[in-house]
Amino acid sequence: MSELIPGLFRAEYRKLVAVLCKRYGFGQIEVAEDLVGDTFLAAAESWARDGVPANPTAWLYSVAKNKALNYLKRDAVFEGKVLPELRRVGTEEELDFSEGNIMDSQLRMIFAVCHPCIPAESQIGLALRVLCGFSIEEIADAFLTNKETINKRLFRAKERLREEKVQLEMPGPQEIDVRVDAVLRTLYLLFNEGYYSTSPNRSFRKELCYEAIRLCQMLVDYSAANALLALMCFHASRFDARLDDKGELILYEQQDTSRWNQDWISKGGYFLQRASEGDRVTKYHLEAGIAYWNTQREDTREKWERILRLYDLLLQIEYSPMAALNRAYALSKVNGPAQAIAEAKRLKLEDNPYYTMLLEALRSRSPGQ
């Protein structure tokens, strides 16, 4: 049972919170989190005493329902404000933990948590807490800060969402593109927190990436989401080849390609094909294209020319130091290390560890530099 409850918590916490918030309003999110926490505490106590039930998930849903109803019966605010409104609109049916409603609730929660009225770092923090079930300690680890800072950040974010009266609802046709972009940006940053993390916890770093992938899969009706999902899959395929036994980064050209995961590469190809069906090209499409070519083992000039062109287009759409640094490496494969070293130095990224590693690698191929 020592592994069962943590696993269920990671899988079911978000679902329970999302359904409770959809039913009773986003303003009740702290109450929802407390009720779900109490549910898992009850599970730990009951299962240790009486044994694990035949259907642990159904047990959790049943106990969460009862705890929610008991709380609401005792709560004066609910009696005075929430209950009359529920009666007015005729929605007094019990909590719905059907698969369809769980999925719908989580999707609505994604749009609420990633609302543009709160800063990006707060969106990521809320996503980790509410959508992924991460503890405050784990979130602090992800941001390389302390629990007090994270608690304050999440509190301010929730207060801001309440002030803006953000609801758990799907955006209308007029705002859907903007809101989807905001959600994808948050998931992109969440994935990068794991992929480029300096946290010493390697398994936790991967977990961040896998959670971003899981959340992105809920948005596959949108072309850009498929492009982002393809990008994530291609990157995930090289997880085991990026670090050595000591946790040190291994440069791309030194990676053992036999450790690239072909299943992830195939998934990436599938979502990249789906992404090509739209008529809008985003930075995720371009980055997914680059990531695709990086999963092709052949070290040909054509491959690197394609990658270089994609980086040129990407930097026109949205500049980032990391993309510019990666472009320098692609440039070295096309025009040689000397030109790439000059290009990299112009970026002035001396504080970036990837910059130092890149220059060392390029200089080893160009002794005169």
Image: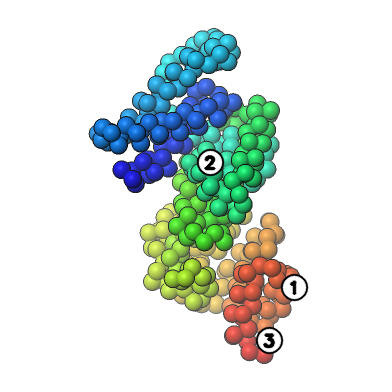
How far apart in space, not on screen, are marks 1 and 3 (Cα)? 15 Å
For the point 59% across and 34% down, the residue is: 112
Q: Quadrant of the N terminus?
A: top left
List the residue tagged with mark 1: 346
Secondary structure state at the residue bearing disc 2: helix
Q: Residues within 10 Å of mark 3 (few under 14, many from 20)?
A: few
Q: Quadrant of the C terminus?
A: bottom right
How far apart in space, not on screen, are marks 2 and 3 (Cα)? 48 Å
Secondary structure state at the residue bearing disc 1: helix
> Is 101 left, or right, of 291 in this rendering?
left
How far apart in space, not on screen, are marks 1 and 2 (Cα)? 39 Å
List the residue tagged with mark 2: 129
List the residue tagged with mark 3: 369
Mark 1: amino acid? Arg
Residue 324, position as x, y percentages in the image? 67, 66
**Do labels 1 and 2 touch, CB within 8 Å?**
no
For the point 68% across and 43% down, the residue is: 119
Q: Does 221 sit above or below residue 355?
A: above
Of the numbered discs 1 and 2, the one sitting upstream in the chain is 2
